[in-house]
Amino acid sequence: MPQQALFSHLTAAELLGVPLPADLASGALHVAVPFPRTPPRGRGVIGHSLGGLAGSSVDGLPVCTPEEVWCQLSTVLGGSDLVAAGDHLVGARSRGAQTDVGLLADAVDRHRGSPGARTRAWALPRIRVGADSRPETLLRLLLEELGFLDLDVNSPVVVDGGRLTLHPDLSIREPRLAFEYEGDGHRERRQWAADIRRREHFEAEGWRVVRVTGDDLFRDRDSLIARLAAFGGTARHESRPSVTNGSDS
């Protein structure tokens, strides 16, 4: 690595654990140096010369700060996936926060007018703490577009006479409506049985549960939208930066 160089863009995102669409996987290493230094070149290296370069460390490796990486991703991700990247970085019950919305906003301000500005401006106010996965974020954004407001993200719901606390992926307290994203891991026998008991607990407390699969979200969205209409969803036309929806990873 050249002196003062940092891993950046997609390479830094992978080191930070940011969930990315499968079609963005690349073996090339993104390496940034402070402007006006010459970007590094070499086989398998994509070099960048960036102003205001700020670094951190991940497992001993020099990496751009999470806020800078999020801004860099705005040039390659659509709006919804940039929100998912932000949701990952601001943390959830299952993982610690690597940044917060305030720091992301400061970075957006620093990069005002640079490539990706429109996508950043769209995504920033939609970032929420609490999402456990990229599909959960994409489901939330779809629900909001369909008119489901005041969605809680992995908020506690007490069931079974106060003996058990569950955390639905997304929920609306009134009416009692829970949305659960179920990836391939939910096909496993024990998980399937646990999901049945989980739904029974919700329904015993008067909740309705909407289960959404990867096929629903990524391959048959029109049918999902029609199904959600029965729960109060009304399609709205929202202008957004281009969205990457091609993978449920």
Image: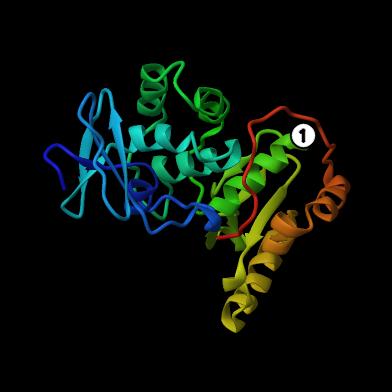
Does 225 sit left or right of 82 as displayed?
right
Percent position (x, y) of residue 196? 68, 73
Q: Which residue is mark 1?
A: 147
Residue extending farthest front? 42
Residue 166 in view of the camera: no
Three-letter code for the amino acid on which mark 1 is drawn: Gly
103 in relation to 28, above or below? above
Secondary structure under badge 1?
Answer: loop
Q: Give neighbour class at mark 1: few <14, some 14-19, many 20+ (Cα, 10 Å).
A: some
Relative image position of residue 90 (x, y in whole percent): 40, 40
The x and y percentages for residue 241 are 63, 31
Left or right: residue 5 compared with residue 111: left
In percent of the image, x 28 and y 31: which residue is there? 49
What residue occupies the far bottom of the structure in this picture? 189
Residues 36 and 52: in front is: 36
The residue at the far left in this view is 3
Query: Closer to the camera, 59 or 77?
Result: 77
In-image side of 175 versus 4 (left or right): right
Residue 207: name its quadrant. Answer: bottom right
- Please state the horizontal and vertical placement of residue 179, each as a whole percent of the image: 68, 53
Occupied quadrant, residue 50: top left
How was the colour assigned to the protein in this rendering? rainbow
Vertical relation: 217 (above or below) 107: below
- Residue at left 24%, top 25%? 35
Which residue is drawn at the image coordinates 14% and 36% (left, top)? 4
> Disc count in the image?
1
Report if residue 92 is visible in the image. Answer: yes
